[in-house]
Amino acid sequence: MKNTSPIVMGSDHAGYALKELIKDYLAALNFQIKDCGAFSEDSVDYSDFGIAVAEKIASGDFNRGILVCGTGLGMSMVANRFKNVRAALCNDIFSAMMSRQHNDSNILVLGGRVIGEELAKEIVHVWLKTPFEGGRHQKRIEKFDTIKSNTI
Ligand code: RB5
């Protein structure tokens, strides 16, 4: 993969193991990773880590993020409250590809209790290498990216 811009990652306890696996996978591909935690499988609130990652995308500090919780649902809900965040819960390869081509997703969300390790790595690979198509999809994104949010 040519694009190795830094990636911000986060998980809760249920996503911790998969986050660690993906972190190692990306490090081996020379990606720089900012890990916002969690740092163990001790029970935590997914909201805290979703917020930490989404803030860094919303502020423009990072262009891409990856979040993992048990299902991916809670992290998606949290992240999509933030302006400029387009978080996509993708537990399959086709969705990961389309979330880039059509939705220009900037956070990939995975369900650590839903998918296996090899599928997760393939989803990440596809998500990172697939470009946004722009064109008619740009206009569609602008229609909701401009909705006022109560966060940054
Ligand atoms: C934690 O038990 C679980 O609720 C969380 O990881 C996530 O699946 C929430 O959406």
Image (cartoon, helix red, strand yellow):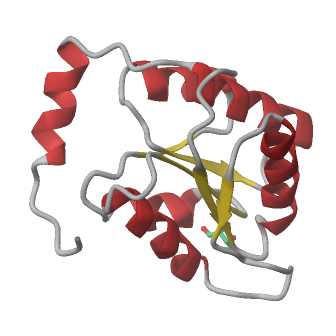
Q: Quadrant of the C terminus?
A: bottom left
| Rendered residue at 27%/51% (across/down) | 84
**Quarter of the image where one finds residue 13:** bottom right
All told, the count of numbered labels is 0
Percent x, y of residue 106:
44, 42
Please state which of residues 97 and 20 is positioned toward the viewer in this rendering: 20
Percent x, y of residue 31:
71, 42
| Rendered residue at 31%/65% (across/down) | 81
Please state which of residues 140 and 61 is positioned toward the viewer in this rendering: 61
Q: In the picture shown, does residue 38 fall above or below 23? A: below
**Quarter of the image where one finds residue 25:** top right
Please state which of residues 72 and 39 is positioned toward the viewer in this rendering: 39
Percent x, y of residue 138:
21, 23
Q: In the picture shown, does residue 31 fall above or below 56? A: above
Task: Tell me: 143 left or right of 93.
Answer: left
Query: Can residue 81 be seen here?
Result: yes
| Rendered residue at 83%/88% (across/down) | 42
Q: In the picture shown, does residue 46 fall above or below 25? A: below
Query: Can residue 80 be seen here?
Result: no
Q: Quadrant of ligand 1?
A: bottom right
Task: Tell me: 110 left or right of 104.
Answer: right
**Quarter of the image where one finds residue 34:** bottom right
Q: In the picture shown, does residue 88 fall above or below 54? A: above
Q: Quadrant of the N terminus?
A: top right
Percent x, y of residue 93:
67, 24
| Rendered residue at 10%/53% (across/down) | 147
